[in-house]
Image (cartoon, rainbow, N blue to C red):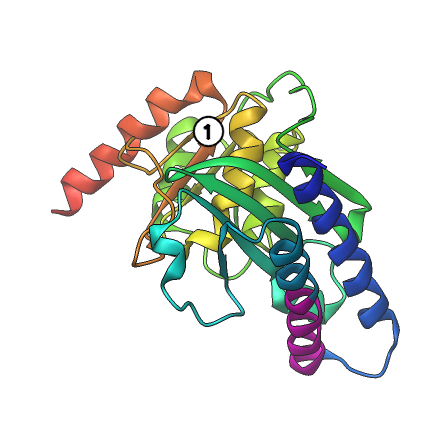
Amino acid sequence: MNDAEIAGHLAETAGKLLLTVRDSAVLSGKALGNAGDQTANQFLVHAIRDQRPDDGLLSEEMKCDGTRLGRQRVWIIDPVDGTREYGEGRPDWAVHVGLAIDGVATIGAVALPGLGVTLTSAAPPALPPAHDPPRLVVSRTRPAREAVAVAEALGGALVPMGSAGAKAMAVVRGEAEIYLHTGGQHEWDNCAPVAVAAAAGLHVSRVDGSPLVYNAEDTYLPDLLICRKELAARVLELVRGLTSSAS
């Protein structure tokens, strides 16, 4: 299998494992989330190391030993993105399997097991016509101040949703036009979603317009913008204005 096929197969298979764990009805809530994380992580780590032993690997659920930093190719995974939603039995959680090459999110697969869907950078769906006014996906519990302000400026609507992967794929699937996040993430939160979004023809960047860079020593990524390309310049301009007025 090529890289894209591996990413898609692993994300989809991990999703099925997670549904089996959840459907066992033995655990719930946080305990279920922990069990799901451990099960999916063990599967993904073993599979990637078997299929691509010379590549680096970064997982949210695995202590980094630093060896990935010397590699050009690094798999970046989040076994359960949206552990809270997974534990609550909601559908808005995801499995991320991404491959960064020379710091660029190049290959990605995002499984949405609760919806029975897996999206990949190799075969992203065609974007449907954009909705006007635009819809912005935001956190269920902590919508970003900047996203709220951009929605108000554009006359858009806020769509609360769980995991980062679910929000990014909502834009890919045409359920929203903008995903603007300023609350801080790590590389595993968005590497695979960014690869899929870019392949689908969407704008992907930091909120200052600079590129998203992966396989850094510090995995923290403060912000993210995934949106329709025709909206990118306006959204970036609005965020710059908010940043200037706050300083």
Image quarter where the N terminus lies is: top right
Residue 18 coordinates in the image, percent (x, y): 77, 64
Residue that lies at the very extreme toward the left in this rendered image: 247
What span is colored magenta in the figure?
Answer: 29-42
Residue farthest to the front, as pictured: 54
Q: Residue at x 66, y 63 (%)?
A: 46
The one nearer the camera, 133 or 174, is: 174
Q: Secondary structure at mark 1?
A: loop
Q: Is residue 31 magenta?
A: yes
Residue under the image location 63 percent in, 37 percent down: 3
Q: Is residue 128 above or below residue 204?
A: above
Q: Nearer the viewer, residue 118 or 47?
A: 47
The quadrant holding residue 47 is: bottom right
Q: Amino acid at mark 1?
A: Gly
In the displayed structure, does residue 49 sit left or right of residue 56?
right
Left or right? Give the position of 198 relative to 147.
Answer: right
Q: Which residue is mark 1?
A: 155
> Residue 241: x, y in percent?
21, 33
Q: Seen from this angle, which residue lies furthest right?
A: 24
Give percent across and percent down for residue 75: 52, 49
Please say whether residue 133 is one of the residues in the magenta stretch.
Answer: no
The secondary structure that dominates the magenta segment is helix
Residue 159 seen from this side: no
Q: Of 169 and 100, which appears nearest the observer?
A: 100
At a point 80% along the width and 63% down the height, the residue shown is 17
